[in-house]
């Protein structure tokens, strides 16, 4: 028997979910399926022996015939809750469909700026509010839609729409971009939001993380990702480099350790992410995994994975919760992959590296006015999983002309290995800004425990 799949398509991209009989274990209610982002489904009907026999059961075309602009790729991770599949399209719509047939149950269209949103969040509601689907818009709104009816939730913020921009930009920076295209996260009655800001240009919207009451939209707490005067980490911003600093934001999404009520925030680079002469210092909490109490926003611990980023080495993957066995003891842990190709395995109770970490000296560049961190952190295990060097014998030899060109390029460019700084002459940097790991994240089998 062939197994059918659901396809949510634009002509450029596909997202595939296997659909089976709707019972509790079939649900995919969060961006990473569970709050800990393990992305593990216990379903067994589709396996390595029959996956090649999958056939298309139905297709949902996200590009409306009435929209004349160029087609956009769908980047969303659909959710499935109580026999309904929910997803956003790149064309200002949130859609609910029947998983077996693809039949549209309802469509919510909005008038906000659209971009290929990466995800949504589902909240089951409470006595004062209905089950709700939350998603962000590129013009800086968090939108709450009734999961049953497809209508705005009037009790949330301003008739179902929360403007995230107030307080996030100073008066002279009101035209700076501020949006939300990563998936919000949910814990108990709170919804958590990061932001999408500019990479180029140092000054703009703030990257603060905030928690909101999921029923009312009222602000519960704010975490300053660029520490303000008197806060921990403020001294890592020299020469007032913290003022009006943009970036340093969670532009992907969060992980929640529901057992301990901990919100894990993978924070990206400060802006400008290729030049730091106007922000000397290590620049906390840029490029850091920060753990806070989910209900209060109070910090529990942090680990900075890149000091003073000059490579756009954001921290986009969700941390994945796992168990680790070391010296015969099972440790509650997490895996935080990074654009650098480095993988940090931490005790999620303390943030301490389980298999060790050391600061290693890295090269200093020659860009006038730039500030360079003398060291960068390297986990002792596992080894770096992305290339950081190149060698002459790796040059391709498809044609003599091609080989000559590449050899001249090699001879004229400098490659200093990991964290090679861009210099005033040609420089080779591995990995590039797209990184070794990006916002796709990882997955694990909960019954396994990692031993290194």
Image: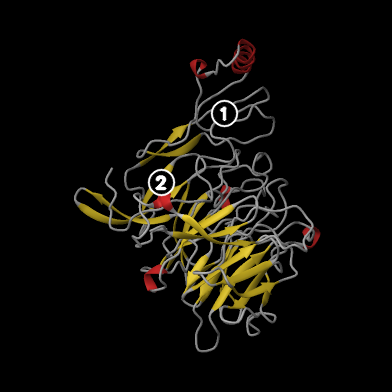
Front-most of residues 451 and 206:
451
Is residue 213 at least partly visible in the picture? no
Identify the residue position indicated by label 1 in the image: 364
- Which quarter of the rendering shows the C terminus? top left
Residue 39: image x %, image y %? 42, 58
Lateral position of residue 23 relative to residue 405, left or right: left
| 57 is higher (above) or lower (below) than 383 | below
Q: Can you name the residue that lies furthest to the front here?
A: 1
- Which quarter of the rendering shows the N terminus? bottom left
Lateral position of residue 249 relative to residue 394, left or right: right
User: On the image, which quarter does residue 171 sit in?
Assistant: bottom right
Secondary structure beneath label 2:
strand
| 308 is higher (above) or lower (below) than 391 | below
User: On the image, which quarter does residue 129 sit in?
Assistant: bottom right
Front-most of residues 380 and 17:
17
| 413 is higher (above) or lower (below) than 28 | above
The residue positioned 60% from the left and 53% from the top of the image is 248
The residue positioned 61% from the left and 10% from the top of the image is 400
Identify the residue position indicated by label 2 in the image: 344
| 265 is higher (above) or lower (below) than 145 | above
The residue positioned 69% from the left and 42% from the top of the image is 278
Secondary structure beneath label 1:
loop
Q: Which mark is residue 166?
A: none
Of the numbered discs 2 and 1, the one sitting upstream in the chain is 2
Residue 124: image x %, image y %? 49, 79
Is residue 103 at least partly visible in the picture? yes
Q: Can you name the residue that lies furthest to the left here?
A: 328
Give the spatial CA distance, label 2 vs label 1: 24 Å
């Amino acid at each position: 028997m062939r197994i059918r799949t659901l396809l949510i398509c634009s002509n450029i991209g596909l997202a595939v979910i296997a659909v089976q009989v709707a019972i509790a274990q079939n649900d995919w209610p969060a961006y990473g399926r569970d709050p800990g982002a393990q992305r593990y489904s216990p379903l067994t009907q589709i396996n390595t022996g029959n996956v090649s026999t999958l056939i298309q059961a139905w297709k949902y075309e996200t590009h409306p015939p009435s929209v004349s602009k160029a087609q956009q790729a769908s980047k969303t991770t659909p959710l499935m809750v109580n026999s309904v599949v929910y997803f956003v399209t790149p064309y200002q719509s949130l859609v609910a469909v029947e998983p077996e047939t693809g039949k549209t149950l309802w469509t919510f269209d909005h008038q906000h700026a659209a971009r290929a949103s990466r995800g949504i969040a589902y909240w089951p509601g409470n006595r004062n509010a209905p089950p709700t689907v939350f998603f962000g818009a590129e013009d800086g709104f968090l939108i709450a839609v009734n999961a049953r009816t497809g209508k705005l939730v009037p009790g949330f913020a301003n008739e179902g729409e929360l403007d995230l921009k107030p307080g996030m930009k100073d008066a002279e920076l009101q035209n700076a971009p501020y949006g939300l295209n990563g998936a919000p996260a949910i814990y108990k009655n709170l919804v958590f939001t990061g932001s999408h800001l500019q990479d180029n240009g140092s000054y703009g919207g703030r990257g603060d993380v905030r928690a909101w009451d999921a029923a009312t939209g009222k602000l519960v707490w704010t975490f300053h990702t660029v520490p303000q005067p008197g806060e921990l980490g403020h001294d890592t911003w020299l020469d007032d480099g913290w003022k009006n600093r943009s970036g340093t934001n969670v532009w992907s999404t969060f992980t929640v350790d529901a057992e301990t009520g901990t919100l894990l925030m993978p924070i990206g680079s400060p802006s400008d992410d290729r030049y730091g002469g106007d922000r000397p210092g290590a620049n906390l909490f840029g490029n850091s995994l920060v753990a806070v109490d989910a209900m209060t926003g109070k910090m529990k611990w942090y680990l900075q994975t890149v000091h003073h980023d000059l490579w756009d080495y954001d921290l986009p993957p969700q941390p994945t919760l796992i168990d680790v066995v070391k010296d015969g003891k099972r440790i509650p842990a997490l895996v935080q992959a990074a654009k650098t190709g480095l993988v940090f395995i931490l005790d999620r109770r303390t943030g301490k590296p389980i298999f060790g970490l050391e600061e290693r000296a890295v090269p200093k560049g020659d860009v006038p006015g730039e500030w360079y961190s003398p060291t960068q952190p390297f986990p002792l295990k596992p080894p770096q999983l992305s290339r950081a060097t190149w060698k002459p014998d790796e040059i391709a030899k498809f044609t003599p002309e091609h080989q000559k060109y590449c050899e001249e390029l090699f001879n004229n460019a400098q490659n200093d290995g990991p964290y090679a700084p861009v210099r005033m002459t040609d420089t080779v940097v591995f990995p590039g800004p797209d990184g070794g790991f990006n916002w796709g994240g990882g997955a694990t089998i909960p019954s396994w425990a990692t031993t290194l």
